[in-house]
Image (tube, rainbow, N blue to C red):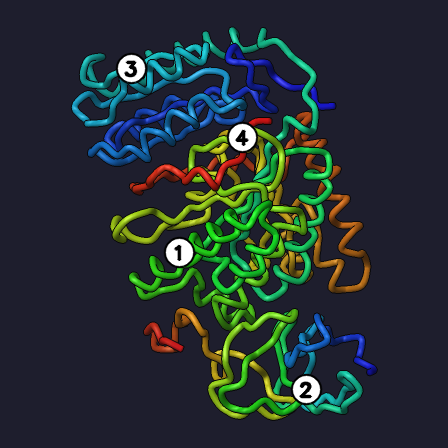
């Protein structure tokens, strides 16, 4: 199962791929044998899907669940607060209007 | 071996610090003015801002003022605050450390107290030059770990590398402490499997459940907008990275702030208060956790950062391990170790782990860390409530 050198897969059961460096949008690269085209730029350390993840499915990183898919995620899509929620406590961010947003 | 400072109570320190401690915020300015001329000569400022008594703060101040790196203590009181200064004085005196109390109201105000405090500090600095030196083994060293300004690279590079350094130290029977149970949410069952015995494993699960409940009550997990910008999505994901700091050794016990482990091994420090949530968030910023690690005897602390924290600490040196290669390029003046090399394929986890281990020994022998050299001496202490740890949590000295 070949994986591009710019990408990190931490454990065999993981359904997230990690960028080791900033990777531009529309880049096509191999992840665990599959060809994936990035829908958007992926920054260093950020995650993207390399296979389809269905809504409600556990997100597995380093073999551990780090949350639940809040909607269907396609290969090449970034995986972050817009499509993952915590099983425990919500994450807060500041939006452009300087308001706290719960995810 | 480490060339350490011998204290009258038998403890061994890696620094020979004079601590100036304010006992209420009203004495903060006077204390800062006393420290200022000597701030790069091993005179550090700590204190407790509250006017109302608190058993946790009292215990923290007693442990910090008798910390092995501390050689002498000047207490600065306004005069009317509720802090139990008599009990603190007794504890310091009993440890054999020189101690003096100056009261601003009794001394006659700001100017006179600053003058009296400075005179005592100068005289005590001369006295501390004669502190006896002694050999200290790695098995006598206590090292803590914390992460701050984390991003998604923290859990990939710096944290597991610090975990390797911990493994090397635990093999040599040093005492290693990891903490922030609020950033271990989701990892409780993995951690429980590493406990020295099943009863301790159950206690670990309970400790993390307490943290989750506490943070939930305040409606905010220990994950902020900066973490999310750095690619961390959920508290579980942040926990996964934070958990890597603990390495792979057996977990010997759970301690609470101010508990000093009786023998070497790996310990989890429970920093989340007991009882109904009150006084706000468990740790309002990273230095609150560093203060608690020091109160458990940590001679020095490892600090991993991805986004780029610059803090150091009063009393115990902080070794800054930078996780993110881009951050390292921007902020290398503040960083002791470039763990981002792991992501770039220029070093392995084991190599960086060994580098951190070797740096720990050099810092223990007097080498200044970047934050020490830059004069960082942050300190913060707030209100908390704790019950004593249960019998299953702390192994005996044998």
Disc 1 is placed on an element classified as: helix
Q: Is residue B347 above or below residue B132?
A: below
Q: Gap between marks 3 and 2, in whole Å?
A: 65 Å
The residue at which mark 3 appears reads as B102
Report helix, strand or loop for mark 3: strand
Q: Nearer the viewer, mark 1 or mark 2?
A: 1
* Label 3, residues with CA under 10 Å away: few <14, some 14-19, many ≥20: many
Give the mark, 4 or 3, whose residue is nearer the N terminus: 3
Query: Real-space Cα distance between discs 1 and 4?
Result: 26 Å
Contact (CB < 8 A) between labels 2 and 4?
Answer: no
The answer for how far apart the CA atoms under marks 1 and 3 are is 39 Å
Label 2, on which residue? A50
- Circle 1/circle 4 CB separation < 8 Å: no
Name the residue that disc number 1 marks.
B211
Residue B296 in the image: state x and y as whole percent: 49, 33
The lab-note entry on whether marks 3 and 2 share a chain reads: no
- Lateral position of residue B189 relative to residue B3, left or right: left
| Residue depicted at 60% across the width and 39% down the height | B176
The x, y position of residue B233, in whole percent, is 51, 73
Front one among B367 and B353? B353
Counting residues from the N terminus, which is met first, the one under dot 1 or under dot 3?
Answer: 3
Instruction: State which quarter of the image contains the C terminus of chain B.
Output: top right
What is the CA distance from the residue labelled 2 to the residue labelled 4?
50 Å
Residue at 44% x, 46% y is B270
The residue labelled by disc 4 is B396
Crowd rating for badge 2 (residues with CA inside 10 Å; few <14, some 14–19, many 20+): many
Q: Chain of mark 2?
A: A
Question: Is residue B206 toward the left or the right of residue B113 in the image?
Answer: right
Same chain for the residues under marks 2 and 4 in the image: no
Residue B84 can be seen in this image: yes
């Amino acid at each position: 199962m070949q994986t591009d050198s710019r990408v990190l897969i931490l454990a065999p059961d993981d359904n997230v791929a990690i960028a080791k460096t900033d990777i531009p949008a529309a880049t096509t690269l191999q992840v665990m044998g599959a060809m994936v085209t990035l829908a958007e730029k992926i920054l260093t350390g950020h995650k993207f899907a390399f296979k389809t993840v269905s809504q409600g499915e556990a997100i597995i990183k380093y073999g551990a669940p780090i949350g639940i898919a809040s909607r269907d995620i396609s290969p090449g899509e970034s995986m972050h607060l817009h499509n993952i929620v915590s099983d425990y406590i919500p994450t807060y961010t500041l939006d452009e209007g300087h308001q706290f947003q719960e995810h | 071996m480490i060339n350490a400072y011998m204290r009258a109570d038998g403890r061994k320190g890696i620094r020979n610090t004079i601590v100036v401690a304010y006992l209420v915020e009203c004495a903060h300015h006077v204390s800062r003015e006393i420290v200022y001329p000597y701030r790069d000569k091993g005179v550090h400022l700590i204190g407790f801002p509250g006017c109302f008594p608190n058993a946790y703060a009292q215990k923290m101040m007693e442990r910090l003022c008798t910390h092995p790196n501390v050689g002498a203590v000047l207490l600065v009181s306004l005069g009317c605050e509720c802090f139990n200064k008599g009990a603190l004085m007794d504890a310091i005196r009993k440890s054999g450390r020189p101690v003096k109390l100056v009261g601003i109201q009794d001394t006659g105000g700001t100017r006179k107290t600053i003058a009296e405090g400075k005179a005592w500090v100068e005289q005590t600095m001369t006295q501390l030059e004669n502190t006896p030196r002694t050999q200290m083994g790695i098995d006598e060293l206590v090292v803590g770990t914390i992460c701050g300004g984390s991003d998604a690279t923290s859990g990939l590079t710096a944290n597991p590398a610090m975990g390797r350094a911990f493994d090397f130290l635990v093999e040599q029977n040093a005492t290693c402490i990891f903490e922030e149970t609020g950033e271990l949410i989701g990892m409780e069952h993995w951690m429980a499997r590493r406990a020295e015995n099943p009863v301790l494993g159950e206690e670990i699960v309970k400790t993390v459940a307490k943290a989750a409940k506490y943070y939930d009550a305040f409606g905010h997990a220990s994950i902020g907008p900066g973490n999310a910008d750095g690619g961390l999505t959920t508290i579980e994901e942040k926990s996964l990275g934070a958990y890597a700091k603990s390495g792979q050794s057996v977990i010997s016990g759970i301690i609470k702030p101010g508990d000093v482990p009786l023998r070497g091994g790996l310990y989890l420090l429970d920093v989340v208060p007991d009882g109904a949530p009150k006084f706000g968030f468990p740790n309002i910023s990273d230095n609150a956790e560093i203060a608690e690690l020091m109160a458990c005897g940590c001679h020095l602390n490892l600090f991993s950062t991805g986004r780029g924290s610059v803090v150091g600490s009063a009393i115990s040196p902080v070794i800054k391990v930078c996780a993110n290669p881009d951050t390292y390029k921007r902020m290398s003046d503040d960083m002791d170790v470039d763990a981002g090399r792991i992501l770039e394929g220029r070093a392995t986890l084991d190599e960086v782990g060994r580098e951190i281990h070797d740096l720990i020994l050099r810092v223990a022998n007097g080498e200044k860390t970047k934050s020490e050299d830059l004069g960082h001496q942050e300190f913060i202490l707030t209100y908390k409530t704790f019950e004593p740890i249960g019998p299953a949590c702390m192994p005996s000295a044998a």
